[in-house]
């Protein structure tokens, strides 16, 4: 069986034990055939490796995190990243507008609400519920939307070339 080991004990034999300091695998010893196992050990190597990776990533994040943002997140005692939550709702609202209106509003009509989110003026559970409702609304909106399933690449590339040409011509005129 994967990751299962028989455990043996014998005072007169010099077994190595099952673990060494700083080792990530089970330590094995040669066992005489007549020895009888006392127990079975299951060592979830995949789970342990995943844990070690996440542990290392966490401490790397702690070392590199933006201390001011972290202090801001812990200061409001809401136990969530308020800036991240604000961006989540901004993107959800923008997606809804794209689906319903077919355009992107960069200047946000819901600016005050977004700032309230950034200031952690809401409870986490309330926000998760609202986000879930918005996500469900988005499925309905995009199923009923008149937006194209795929972009017309020829038109997009033509528009891109036209915009670049105008941009470079404008910059040349300014520099001269």
Image (tube, helix red, strand yellow):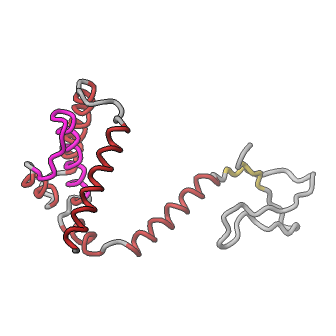
State the residue at coordinates (33%, 50%): 161
Q: Describe residue 93's horizontal placement relative to residue 25 as left or right.
A: left
Q: Quadrant of the N terminus?
A: top right
The main secondary structure of the magenta stretch is: helix
Residue situated in front as seen by the camera: 78 or 18: 78
State the residue at coordinates (64%, 54%): 45
Q: Decide whether residue 91 is among the magenta residues.
A: yes
State the residue at coordinates (13%, 54%): 114
Q: Describe residue 165's horizontal placement relative to residue 5 as left or right.
A: left
Q: Quadrant of the C terminus?
A: bottom left
Q: Percent x, y for residue 46?
A: 62, 52
Of all residues shown, which one is farthest toward the top? 144
State the residue at coordinates (79%, 61%): 28
Q: Percent x, y for residue 118?
A: 16, 59
Q: Percent x, y for residue 170?
A: 21, 63
59 to 133, vertically: above or below: below
136 to 2, vertically: above or below: above
Q: Decide whether residue 24 is among the magenta residues.
A: no
30 to 34, vertically: above or below: below
Q: Which residues are magenta?
A: 84-108
Q: Quadrant of residue 65?
A: bottom left
Q: Quadrant of residue 63?
A: bottom left
Q: How many numbered marks have been drawn onto this rendered protein structure?
A: 0
Q: Percent x, y for residue 123?
A: 17, 51
Residue situated in front as seen by the camera: 103 or 119: 103
Of all residues shown, which one is farthest toward the right? 33
Residue situated in front as seen by the camera: 142 or 76: 142
Q: Describe residue 3's horizontal placement relative to residue 142 as left or right.
A: right
Q: Describe residue 57's horizontal placement relative to residue 173 as left or right.
A: right
Q: Quadrant of residue 92?
A: top left
């Amino acid at each position: 069986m994967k990751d299962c080991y028989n455990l043996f004990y014998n005072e007169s034999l010099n077994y190595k034990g099952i673990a060494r300091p700083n080792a990530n695998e089970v330590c094995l010893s040669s066992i005489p055939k007549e020895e009888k196992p006392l127990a079975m050990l299951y060592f979830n190597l995949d789970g342990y490796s995943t844990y070690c990776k996440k542990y290392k990533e966490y401490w790397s994040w702690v070392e590199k995190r933006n201390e001011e943002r972290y202090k801001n997140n812990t200061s409001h005692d809401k136990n969530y990243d308020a800036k991240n939550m604000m961006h989540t709702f901004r993107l959800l609202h923008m997606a809804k507008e794209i689906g319903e209106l077919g355009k992107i509003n960069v200047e946000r009509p819901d600016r005050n609400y977004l700032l309230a989110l950034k200031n952690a003026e809401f409870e986490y559970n309330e926000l998760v519920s609202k986000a879930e409702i918005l996500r469900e609304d988005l499925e309905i909106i995009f199923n009923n939307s008149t937006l194209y399933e795929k972009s017309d690449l020829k038109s997009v590339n033509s528009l891109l070339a036209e915009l670049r040409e105008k941009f470079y011509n404008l910059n040349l005129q300014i520099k001269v």
